Image (cartoon, rainbow, N blue to C red):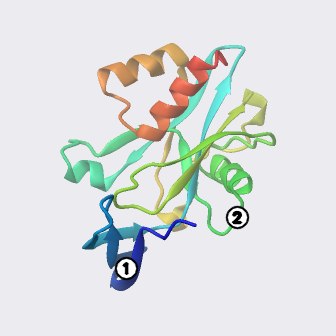
Amino acid sequence: MKNEPIKNVQSKLLSDNWYSLRKFTYDYQKKDGSWDRQEREAYDRGNGAAILLYNSKDSTIILTRQFRLPTYINGNPSGMMIEACAGLLDDENPEDAIRRETEEETGFKIASVKRVFEAYMSPGSVTEILYFFIAEYTDAMKISDGGGVDEESENIEVLKLHINEAMQMVKTGEIKDAKTILLLQYIKLEGII
């Protein structure tokens, strides 16, 4: 049995304002067997799910556009991001959470979702694992305008794009969101639309 590569883990809460930011101090065993004392900070906001809605008949997809402060701080002049629908699990299983988020953000009520993969999006600093889904939509599934939840201060614009237009937006840099790029590439590589 192999020994654990870390020991003596200590945690200190730095912020619990929106979600929790903690500073961890621990001993990490290097390849040569020696131990190195390390400090890292980790942001825990819970796990999430993302979905790409697609229509195979007309080769369209549904994306969202909303303001993202961290991108604005890091040089995105408008702070607006084009993204696949996504959200936190909020103590739900990933399938139920993404159905709820889809209805809140896009206005589409979907029954059947397909989980395609899961990934850590920023494992050097964020604990979140993201569950990725796709689902076929039809215009008949649209039950509201979407736009998000007022209590969460969401102000989301729903976009219907042809898949080729979306892929071009990745090339030009209009779409810079990693989860969206992964899902777009997935449906193209799998020949879904």
* Secondary structure state at the residue bearing disc 2: loop
Residue 46 appears in the rendering: yes
Residue 92: give its label. Answer: 2
Q: CA distance from mark 2 to mark 1?
A: 22 Å
Q: Residue at image x 36%, y 49%?
A: 67
Q: Residue at image x 49%, y 59%?
A: 128
Residue 17: give its label. Answer: 1
Q: Nearer the viewer, residue 57 or 192?
A: 192
- Direction right: furthest residue: 111
Give left or right: position of 24 versus 3.
left
Give left or right: position of 63 versus 70.
right
* Secondary structure state at the residue bearing disc 1: loop
Q: CB atoms at circles 2 and 1 under 8 Å apart?
A: no
Count all numbered tags in the image, as a single digit.
2
Determine the image quadrant of residue 26.
bottom left
Q: Residue at image x 41%, y 78%?
A: 7
Quadrant (top left, top right, bottom left, bottom right) of the N terminus? bottom right
Q: Amino acid at mark 1?
A: Asn
Residue 159 appears in the rendering: no
Q: Amino acid at mark 2?
A: Glu
Task: Classify mark 1: residues with Cα within 10 Å, few (<14), some (14-19) or many (20+).
Answer: few
Coordinates of residue 80 in the picture (x, y in percent)? 34, 42
Vertical placement of residue 30 versus 164, above or below: below
Coordinates of residue 182 in the picture (x, y in percent)? 49, 33
Vertical placement of residue 174 versus 143, above or below: above
